[in-house]
Image (spheres, rainbow, N blue to C red):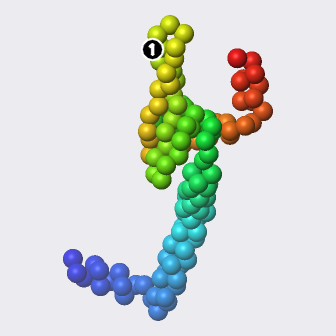
């Protein structure tokens, strides 16, 4: 069995450096492709999410990562208090339902506070 390995090395010839360079070039090209198709877009997405989290403000309509929809009532250090609806306490008396979620679980902002769409909805009600 060891004779087969020795014969394979013997038949390789004098140019043993070319396959090493070709292999290194292949891995460099493969890494470049992976970087531009996977790593770089993920870094851009993380940067955009971080920017969105820092620009949250009261009144924004948001979607939490679990699919929970709400409007920001208050922002604390790492917590966001969301108004998710109202509950009827007595006839014609409603109390808001508020929940706390971690700030980084906010997945998207659906409407910024004071936009034209919200002003139209508020005036229609």
User: Which residue is labeled 1 in the image?
Assistant: 89
**Which residue is farthest bottom?**
14
Q: Position of residue 124 (x, y in %)?
A: 74, 18
Q: Position of residue 117 (x, y in %)?
A: 75, 30
Residue nearest the observer in this picture, 60 or 43: 60
Q: Position of residue 107 (x, y in %)?
A: 54, 42
| Residue 89 placement: quadrant | top left
Q: Residue at x 48, y 82 (%)?
A: 20
Q: SS class of the residue under badge 1?
A: strand
Residue nearest the observer in this picture, 91 or 38: 91
Q: Position of residue 120 (x, y in %)?
A: 77, 25
Q: Residue at x 37, y 87 (%)?
A: 10
The answer to whether residue 45 is seen in the rendering is no
Q: Is residue 119 above or below residue 14?
A: above
**Which residue is farthest top?**
91
Q: Is residue 40 above or below residue 122?
A: below
């Amino acid at each position: 069995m060891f004779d087969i390995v020795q014969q394979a090395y013997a038949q390789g010839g004098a140019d043993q450096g070319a396959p090493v360079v070709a292999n290194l070039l292949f891995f460099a090209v493969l890494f470049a492709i992976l970087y531009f198709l996977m790593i770089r877009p993920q870094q851009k997405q993380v940067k955009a999410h971080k920017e969105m989290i820092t620009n949250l403000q009261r009144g924004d309509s948001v979607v939490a990562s679990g699919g929970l929809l709400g409007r920001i009532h208050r922002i604390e250090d790492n917590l966001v208090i969301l108004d998710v609806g109202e509950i009827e306490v007595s006839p014609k008396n409603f109390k808001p339902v508020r929940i706390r979620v971690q700030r980084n679980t906010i997945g998207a902002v659906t409407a910024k506070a004071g936009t034209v769409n919200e002003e139209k909805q508020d005036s229609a009600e």
